[in-house]
Image (cartoon, rainbow, N blue to C red):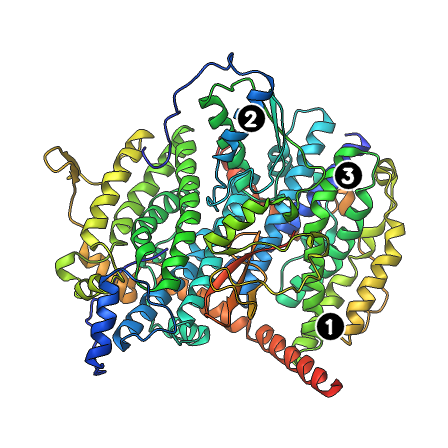
Amino acid sequence: MSALHKPPASRRSAMAHAGETSVVKIRAILADIPDPEIPAVSVLDLGIVREVTDDRVVITPTYTGCPATLYIEQAIRRALDANGFMHVRIETALSPPWSTDWISDEGREKLRAYGIAPPPKGAAAASLKNDQRAQCPRCGSLNTVEVSRFGSTPCKALWRCNACVEPFDRFKCH
Amino acid sequence: MDALATSALRLGDDSLVLGQRLSEWCGHAPALEIDLSLANCALDLIGQATHFLGLAGELEGKVRDADTLAYRRDVMDFTNCLLVEQQNGDFAHTIARQFLFSNYQELLFAGLTASKHARFAEIAAKAVKEVAYHAKLASDWVVRLGDGTDESRTRMIAALDWMWRFSDELFVMDEVDAALGIDKAALRPAWDRRIDAALAEAALERPSPRRGVMGGRAGHHSEQLGHLLSEMQFLQRSYPGATW
Amino acid sequence: MYTTDLTGKKQAETVAEDPKKLAAFEARVANDEFIEPKDWMPEAYRKTLIRQISQHAHSEIVGMLPEGNWITRAPNLRRKAILIAKVQDEGGHGLYLYSAAETLGISRDEMTEALHAGKAKYSTIFNYPTLTWADIGAIGWLVDGAAIMNQVPLQRTSYGPYARAMVRICKEESFHQRQGYEIMMAMMAGTPDQQRMAQDAMNRWWWPALMMFGPPDDRSPNTEQSLRWRIKRETNDELRQKFVDITTPQAEAIGLKVPDPALKWNAKRGSYDFGEVDWEEFYAVVRGEGPVAKERMQARVNAWEDGAWVRDAARAHAEKRASAKVAAE
């Protein structure tokens, strides 16, 4: 099975966790859950987690049809269970809809380091008309051009840098 | 089925059938970029359909889920408009269908975001951003094809002419829509303005008025829907009760 | 998706390279440095890379067809969404890889033309048909699994843009593999009909998956130079063994039988012994004699030819816009 299913980590009692500390611990668990397709960022970085209390985690989907969302919920469930938080419910909220502005500054930096140009901030509302140049994640040049509005996943477009000729993905404004 | 459940079903069926149609292009589009864009639209639509059909099932009484509704109904119980079930034809036909429909769907979802029915409002708020993308994509292609070569212009005119008769049905109001609290007929002027603006940019004329073909909301479809369903539902029909 | 060494011919090295530059290049590569598009590189290296990256890109594009065959018939909404997203992923990878190959001085149109003319190769695996829904599971699990095995070492390949592309592509492929295995798992936990479909798909895809690692090392003339240039990092046979070792227990865990009577755990080696691949079949498929090779190529050519008027229109429109802009200025 190796690569496909990791055995659960050592189980601990949930009884010890209470209030504030639980929330801190749950957030720490979530910070370790990677996006299934872009594992450089965690579900926290992406802004998918809307709310954490000591008995529930509220998440929101990025795109209505994004298959990663389904796996993220399963991954969160497994991680919570493995750490003794069996009683914590996972709820999905659609409203207000997720936008790329919810990606944290840390998440943006991780995307860049991973080779994906992060979406410009504050531009989500104007995403259709947004023709701002992407910055090459490799050499930093703004002399770049869009190759395809649609890339390998709904969240990405394909760009090319004219300075270092590197093709690169850009996380689209949404 | 009560009116609200039927409303959710209509919204879900529109997205499902159009998503199914668009996905037929996968791997066969005129350019790789187009292939990706159509697949992306299909994915959005299937996602929306899942939400709306799920909601329809809940409102109906929690017996049928989204999959049961998608895979276990026959033609007469499908409530999508006739426009979305039209065959892909050439790329111009696919674009004409998308252009007429996505512009309608964007206006509809934008209106629904203010609905007093919170579940509809939140799905619409999520979906309207995606559909705005579809409308922009289709409108851009109408302009490119209309104002491209002689051949593309001829094909675009023929495609609009083919799809046009199915547009009236989009704006027909009945008691089901009234229960949802959205006035579809009132969307028409804004839709006309959008359509006319893109056609003007493409130097294309609006197709001449004609009698609208209708019936989808009542389960009276074109001949193509049965074929679409028999393909889509093939596994569920052949192996009833199996989980996949 | 990707396959190694399809040609089986040694590239003719006709260009006489500057020995000093060549030595410096070889030293950089030996030192595990990345070669970037604007760096000097020997012509044979450039050609080998173009061949490999474009083959890889073509494989992604042709690979959309066998799976695309089941999108309209996916058994539920979730599986349908996952499959559409997967095929979009492959198209996106193809596009990315074409762009990476373009950094070496070839155009996408040239590469497409070579594919349609039958001059360029793509992964032989896609010349097998997808007959039941279980084939979608088998492709995700076995074919993507083999592809990942091939691609993981390429994350450290010497050509920078290719290596960096591989890092991200491998992550996305791993996601696919999980989904494929999940399909097989669901079917093996299902009805006898479903189990029969799953085992049948296993029987048909196992050997072609093993062929994805290319010919045996003693018949793979490009291997030695490619290893030296860090275009390749492990040999075909090493990767094939690794695949068998990882996949066999996965099959057994869900009750699938590996269709190889010679398959046996060898405790001494800490690996599975397995039977000989039918190399005659492999070479036939490479020659373009796979069961649906003609259908696959015809589908690509038809899409390209039927879409010519669309691409012409887009070009004509862009030119009109550009000249209108010039006139206005």
Depth check, front residue: B85 or B131:
B131
Label 1 SS? helix
User: What's the amino acid at mark 3?
Assistant: Ala
Answer yes or no: do the residues labelled 2 and 1 have beta carbons within 8 Å?
no
Task: Say which residue label 2 marks.
Answer: A24
Mark carried by residue C156? none
Q: CA distance from mark 2 to mark 1?
A: 61 Å
Q: CA distance from mark 2 to mark 3?
A: 33 Å
Q: Chain of mark 1?
A: B
Q: CA distance from mark 1 to mark 3?
A: 36 Å
Task: Say which residue label 3 marks.
Answer: B121
Q: Quadrant of residue B211?
A: bottom right
Depth check, front residue: C133 or C16:
C16
Could you classify mark 3 by the number of other residues whose Cα lies within 10 Å: few (under 14), some (14-19), or many (20 or more)? many
Could you classify mark 1 by the number of other residues whose Cα lies within 10 Å: few (under 14), some (14-19), or many (20 or more)? many
User: What's the amino acid at mark 1?
Assistant: Ile
